[in-house]
Image: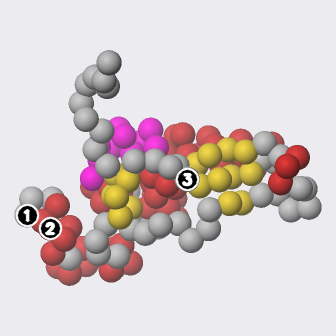
Amino acid sequence: MGRRGRPKIPRFISEEPKFRIFKPHGVPFRHLDKVVLTVDELEAIRLVDYMDFTQEEAAKLMGISRRVLWSLLKEGRKKISDALINGKIIIIEGGFYKIRECGFCMRNRFGIKKHCRNINNMNGE
C-alpha cells in the first residue's frame, strides 16, 4: 500500500554542503558511532543559527512552513549536540530537497525581492 496523506514537498537549499563528514580528532573512524544530519536540517541550521535569519524568513526561503522549519531545527540541533557531547561522527546526507536556482539571493539578505526573479516567481509575486 502506498503512502497516505499529503505529498511531501521538497525543501529548497542554496547549495550542496561543501563538507559531508565531521569526526572527533584522533579516534579511528571504525571505533565511532555516527549521527546522520540531513541536508535540509543543515540548511535550516545554517539559515537561522549561522546567517541570523528569523525562522519566518528561513521557512520562506526553504519553501516550507514555520512548523516544518522548527522541526528541522530541533532534530538537527539534537543530532549535533549528541555528536559533540558523545564523540560521534556527523555524516551529512539525505533529506528531501532541491537546490535553489539563484545562489546570489542567499548571500544578499536584503536584496531578495529586488534582485532575484526566481524567488519572486516561487512566492507567486
Badge nearest the viewer, 2 or 3:
3
Q: Residue at x 17, y 61 (%)?
A: 122
The CA span between labels 1 and 3 is 32 Å
Which residue is more in the foreground, 80 or 57?
Answer: 80
Residue 16 locus on image (x, y percent): 47, 66
The CA span between labels 1 and 2 is 5 Å
Cβ atoms at labels 2 and 3 below 8 Å apart: no
Query: Local crowd at mark 2 within 10 Å, few (<14), some, or many (≥20)?
Result: few
Query: Local crowd at mark 1 within 10 Å, few (<14), some, or many (≥20)?
Result: few
Q: Quadrant of the N terminus?
A: top left
Which residue is more in the foreground, 24 or 54?
Answer: 24
Amino acid type, mark 1: Glu
Indicate whether 119 appears above or below 123: below
- The residue singled out by tag 1 in the image is 125
Mark 3 secondary-structure assignment:
loop
- The residue singled out by tag 3 in the image is 93
Asked if residue 70 lies in the magenta stretch, the reply is: yes
The CA span between labels 2 and 3 is 29 Å
Cβ atoms at labels 1 and 2 below 8 Å apart: yes
Mark 1 secondary-structure assignment:
loop
Mark 2 secondary-structure assignment:
helix
Q: Mark 1 or 2 closer to N-term?
A: 2
Q: Residue furthest front?
A: 1
109 lies left or right of 90: left
Q: Residue at x 15, y 59 (%)?
A: 123
* Magenta span main SS: helix
Q: Quadrant of the C terminus?
A: bottom left
Q: Which residues are magenta?
A: 63-72
- The residue singled out by tag 2 in the image is 120
Which residue is more in the foreground, 100 or 73?
Answer: 100
Cβ atoms at labels 1 and 3 below 8 Å apart: no
